[in-house]
Image (tube, grey):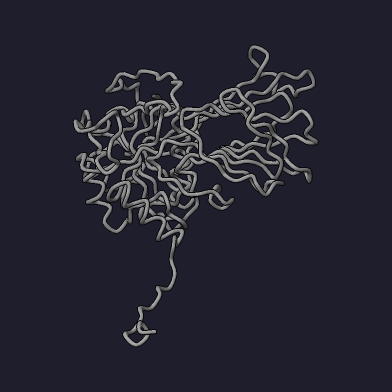
C-alpha cells in the first residue's frame, strides 16, 4: 500500500499472510467466511468445533505476528472527539510504538490544525479514500464515534477486513460496545490478543447498469462489455425505494433465478443480521443475532397486508430488477451511501460475502448483543407486575 506519512512516503508492505479468494458455494448455509483479518490477525481455532459450527462465546482473536499498525476512524468536525482522539494517538504512538493511519481529511480538519497536534502529526500516515489501498498496511482498526464509523470502516475494505474495535462516542452506539474511560487497558488487551470477536457477515452486491445509447458521457466511459458493473461490500442493508417519484415502487425479486414475488410499495430492504436492528426493524422486521447465517427481506410500506418480512438462508442469491410494467425508476442505496438510479434492464445481485467484519467484543457476542438491545433499543422494557399478597391470592 502507498500511503503518505508526514515528510516521507511509506513503501509497499509485504503481507504476513497468503490471500486465497473464496468462491461462492451453492450451499444454503452460505460461503465459509474468511477467518484471517488484515495482515496479521486471525480467529483462534477451536478444536471442539463440530461441523464447522462454533459456539459464539468461544470466538477469540489471535495474532500471527504482533500488530504494529492501526487505522483510526473518527467523525469529522466533531469537537467533542478532539480530546479522546488526541489521547488515543499519543497512547498508540508513544507508549505502544504503533504506526497510526488515518484519512487525510481527518488530519486536515480545521479543529485539529492547531499547535497542540503538531507533535502527533509527525507519527501519522495519511491516505485518501478511493485512491490509496491500505488493505495490507493496517493490522486493526479503532473507531471513535457512533455506528456510522463502523459502517464507514467496513466500506474502506472490499475484501479482508482487519479486526475493528469501536468506542461509543456517538448518538446510538448499537455496534460500538466500548466506553472510552478505560481505553488504555482495553486497547492493550486487544494488542495482546486477549479479546473475543464476532464475525458480522456482509453482503456482496453487484449493480449492473444496462448500456444505453442516450447515456451521458460519464456513464458511457465506465461501460465495459456492454454493461456497467459495480461491486460493493455492505454491512447493514441494501435499500431499493421509489426515490422522488409519487408512484409505488414496482420491482421483481428473484431467488436463485426464480421469481418469488413483485414488491409494490415504497421499496424493499435486504439486510444482514447486523442490519436487522437498523432500518429493517423500523420497517417491522424481527431482530436477528449477527451469528445467525441469514439474509432478511423486508418490504417498506407494502401495498398488501399479507406481505410480511421473511428470512432466507445465507447461501441464496437474490436479484432485484425493475418490473416491466413499473411506472417509474427505482433508487438503490448501500449502507446509506452510493445512492444511484435503477432503470428497466438494470439489476442488483445480492449474496452473502466471504469477507465478514471481525468486530471486537467488550465481553462476548451474546452478552454484548443483548446489552445493546436493552441499552439502545430498550427491548422489553416495562414496569414489572406487582406480586400478589397473601390476601389477594385467596381470591
Number of marks in the rendered image:
0
Left or right of 214, for residue 83: left
Q: Position of residue 324 (x, y in %)?
A: 77, 28
The image shows residue 86, relative to residue 100, as above or below, that is below
Q: Residue furthest bottom?
A: 391
Between 9 and 42, the one nearer to me in the picture: 42
Visible residue check, residue 106: yes
Q: Position of residue 252 (x, y in %)?
A: 68, 31
Visible residue check, residue 116: no
Q: Quadrant of residue 264?
A: top right
Residue at the image position 38 percent from the left and 28 percent from the top: 160
Residue at the image position 35 percent from the left and 78 percent from the top: 387
Between 118 and 231, the one nearer to me in the picture: 231
Q: Quadrant of residue 154?
A: top left
Quarter of the image that includes the N terminus: top left
The image shows residue 389, relative to residue 122, as above or below, that is below
Residue at the image position 43 percent from the left and 66 percent from the top: 381
Q: Position of residue 390 (x, y in %)?
A: 31, 85
Amino acid at each position: 500500500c502507498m500511503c503518505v506519512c508526514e515528510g516521507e512516503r511509506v513503501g509497499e508492505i509485504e503481507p504476513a499472510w497468503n490471500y486465497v479468494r473464496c468462491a461462492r458455494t451453492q450451499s444454503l448455509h452460505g460461503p465459509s467466511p474468511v477467518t484471517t483479518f488484515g495482515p496479521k490477525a486471525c480467529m483462534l481455532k477451536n478444536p471442539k468445533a463440530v461441523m464447522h459450527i462454533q459456539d459464539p462465546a468461544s470466538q477469540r482473536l489471535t495474532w500471527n505476528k504482533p500488530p504494529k499498525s492501526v487505522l483510526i476512524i473518527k467523525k469529522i468536525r466533531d469537537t467533542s472527539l478532539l480530546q479522546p482522539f488526541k489521547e488515543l494517538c499519543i497512547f498508540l504512538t508513544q507508549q505502544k510504538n504503533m504506526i497510526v493511519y488515518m484519512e487525510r481529511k481527518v488530519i486536515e480538519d480545521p479543529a485539529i490544525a492547531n499547535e497542540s497536534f503538531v507533535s502527533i502529526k509527525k507519527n501519522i500516515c495519511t491516505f485518501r479514500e478511493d485512491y490509496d489501498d491500505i488493505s495490507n498496511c493496517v493490522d486493526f482498526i479503532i473507531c471513535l464515534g457512533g455506528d456510522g464509523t463502523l459502517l464507514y470502516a467496513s466500506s474502506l475494505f472490499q475484501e479482508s477486513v482487519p479486526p475493528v474495535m469501536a468506542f461509543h462516542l456517538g448518538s446510538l452506539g448499537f455496534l460500538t460496545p466500548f466506553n472510552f474511560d478505560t481505553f488504555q487497558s482495553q486497547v492493550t488487551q486487544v494488542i495482546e490478543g486477549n479479546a473475543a470477536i464476532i464475525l458480522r457477515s456482509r453482503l456482496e452486491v453487484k449493480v449492473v447498469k444496462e448500456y444505453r445509447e442516450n447515456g451521458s458521457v460519464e456513464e458511457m466511459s465506465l461501460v465495459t462489455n456492454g454493461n456497467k458493473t459495480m461491486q460493493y461490500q455492505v454491512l447493514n442493508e441494501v435499500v431499493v425505494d421509489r426515490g422522488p417519484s409519487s408512484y409505488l415502487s414496482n420491482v421483481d425479486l428473484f431467488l436463485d433465478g426464480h421469481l418469488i414475488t413483485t414488491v409494490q410499495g415504497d421499496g424493499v430492504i435486504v439486510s444482514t443480521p447486523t442490519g436487522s436492528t437498523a432500518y429493517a426493524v423500523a420497517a417491522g422486521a424481527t431482530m436477528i443475532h449477527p451469528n445467525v447465517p441469514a439474509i432478511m427481506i423486508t418490504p417498506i410500506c407494502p401495498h398488501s397486508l399479507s406481505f410480511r418480512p421473511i428470512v432466507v438462508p445465507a447461501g441464496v442469491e437474490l436479484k432485484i430488477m425493475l418490473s416491466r410494467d413499473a411506472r417509474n425508476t427505482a433508487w438503490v442505496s448501500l449502507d446509506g451511501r452510493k445512492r444511484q438510479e435503477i432503470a428497466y434492464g438494470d439489476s442488483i445481485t445480492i449474496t452473502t460475502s466471504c469477507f465478514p467484519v471481525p468486530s471486537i467484543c467488550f465481553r462476548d457476542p451474546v452478552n454484548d448483543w443483548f446489552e445493546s438491545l436493552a441499552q439502545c433499543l430498550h427491548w422489553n422494557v416495562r414496569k414489572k407486575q406487582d406480586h400478589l399478597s397473601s390476601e389477594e391470592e385467596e381470591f
